[in-house]
């Protein structure tokens, strides 16, 4: 059985990737960092099938030990400080975690076993103030946040270790992908959870920032399949993974509230605190290379994604209310 080590297994993508790899017959090892309370909510249903190893991206020795002890064939580096807004308030932590830690992991692989295949979670946030539309693997980067800058570093150090040490190291340049397991601070989940709360009479208003920003949103469950496909190729490479469609935050609100027979204009209020010092106005990718080389295509439409998230939050909140009754 192949063995995969996943960093960030407690996050959105880690949970979907772990599910997918278990289904393919992998032994899955999840790296988790120490916290004062256990936060396995997203992987509770598969917890018994996963082996856990303690480690932190900020601690080089823990990465080396994790690889020595568990001897993975593949490593998926999904862990990061992943919230763009936080990166403006904690730029140094974001740089340490999201940028330099990629080097820590690559060095751990180089030292312990350079045959291990490596996946780096790169991001469309690297395109920032976009140089062309749509964005492809050859579009120049122009990041607009400390997070985006950190991801550019992570991306290029992955390319550099591939070229310098012949590592099988690939980057997936993933555009925004969402799900009912998305963190509550990201705009899609904030909207689906907020709309469901308003529908159930738990809230009246939802405060948001820039409603005109446009993103290329897909479903996380579709995107983790592309990560795996990248590591099955004979040669490592970089791939854009996206839906190829773009929608505004306003459109997301409209669909989510309409699904619950509400008008978003009656409930959404714009609050300056959610605006960013520098914004990424428009993202839309071209997944042509992934389609040709990996035979990968997204399978969830924007409308289905919004509906899935709203329905899940409605069920979640209804369940909580029943529990209280
Ligand atoms: P997420 O839900 O925020 O999960 C982040 C994970 O990283 C969590 O498991 C977190 O652990 C872990 N982590 C943070 N700091 C760590 C540290 N110092 N040591 C070890 N683990 C640490 O993120 P996601 O949405 O699943 O995204 C996965 C990756 O893809 C990230 O690198 C993100 O930047 C990148 N990405 C995401 C998207 C997207 O749209 N989702 C698009 C492009 C790229 P705790 O649970 O302990 O906090
Ligand atoms: N979070 C948030 N909260 N965003 C808001 C809000 C709000 O109240 N109101 C408007 N927005 C806008 C943001 O300004 C941004 O333009 C857009 O909604 C999306 O914000 P997020 O959902 O926070 O995602 P992101 O695009 O900044 O970053 C995500 O996607 C990247 C890939 O492009 C994260 O998952 C990153 O980790 C990922 O790399």
Image (cartoon, rainbow, N blue to C red):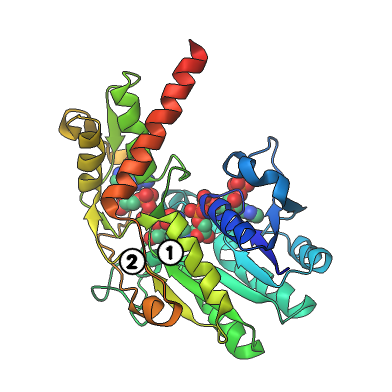
Percent position (x, y) of residue 239? 43, 76
Q: Residue at x 29, y 39 (%)?
A: 208
| Identity of the residue drawn at 62% across and 53% down | 9
Label 2: which secondary element: loop
**Who's the residue at 44% across and 55% down the image?**
220
Q: Residue furthest top?
A: 325
Quadrant where the image shows the N terminus: bottom right
Tell whether circle 1 marks a residue whose Cβ is less than 8 angstroms from ligand 2: yes
Left or right side of 211 for 24:
right
The 10 Å Cα crowd at callout 2, few under 14, some 14 to 19, many 20 or more, is many
Q: Which mark is residue 128?
A: 2
**How many callouts does the rendering have?**
2
**Where does residue 252 sit, x and y in percent of width and height?**
25, 45
| CA distance for labels 1 and 2 | 7 Å
Of 131 and 173, the residue lying toward us: 173
Residue topped by disc 1: 148
**Dividing the picture into quarters, in which one does residue 240 lie?**
bottom left
Asked whether the viewer can see residue 150, the reply is no
Above or below 247: residue 127? below
Q: Earlier in the sequence, mark 1 or mark 2?
A: 2
- Give left or right: position of 110 versus 44: right
Contact, CB < 8 Å: mark 1 with mark 2?
yes
Element at label 1: helix
Classify 180 as above or below 22: above
Give the percent coordinates (x, y) of residue 217.
33, 56
């Amino acid at each position: 059985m192949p063995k995969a080590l996943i960093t960030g297994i407690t996050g959105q993508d880690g949970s979907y990737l772990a599910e997918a790899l278990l289904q393919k017959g992998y032994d899955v090892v999840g790296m988790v960092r120490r916290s004062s309370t256990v936060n396995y909510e997203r992987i509770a249903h598969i917890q018994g099938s996963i082996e856990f190893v303690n480690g932190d991206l900020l601690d080089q020795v823990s990465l080396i030990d994790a690889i020595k002890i568990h001897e993975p064939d593949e490593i998926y580096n999904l862990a990061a400080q992943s919230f763009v807004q936080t990166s403006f308030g904690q730029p140094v932590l974001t740089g340490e975690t999201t940028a330099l830690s990629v080097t820590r992991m690559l060095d751990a692989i180089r030292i312990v076993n350079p045959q291990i295949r490596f996946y780096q979670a790169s991001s469309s946030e690297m395109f920032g103030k976009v140089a062309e539309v749509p964005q492809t693997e050859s579009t120049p980067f122009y990041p607009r946040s400390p997070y985006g800058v950190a991801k550019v570093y992570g991306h290029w150090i992955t390319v550099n270790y591939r070229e310098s040490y012949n590592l099988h190291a690939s980057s997936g340049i993933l555009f925004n992908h969402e799900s009912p397991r998305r963190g509550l601070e990201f705009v899609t989940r904030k909207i689906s959870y907020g709309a469901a709360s308003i529908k159930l009479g738990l809230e009246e208003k939802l405060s948001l920032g820039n409603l005109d920003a446009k993103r290329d949103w897909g479903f996380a469950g579709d995107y983790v399949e592309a990560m795996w496909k990248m590591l099955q190729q004979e040669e490592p490479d970089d791939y854009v993974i996206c839906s190829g469609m773009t929608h505004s935050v306003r459109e997301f609100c409209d669909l989510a509230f309409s699904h619950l027979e509400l008008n978003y204009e009656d409930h959404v209020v714009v609050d300056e605190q959610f605006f960013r010092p520098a914004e990424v106005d428009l993202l839309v990718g071209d997944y042509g290379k992934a389609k040709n080389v990996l035979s990968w295509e997204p399978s969830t439409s924007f409308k289905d994604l919004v509906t899935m998230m709203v329905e899940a939050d409605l069920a979640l909140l209804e369940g909580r209310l029943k529990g209280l009754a």
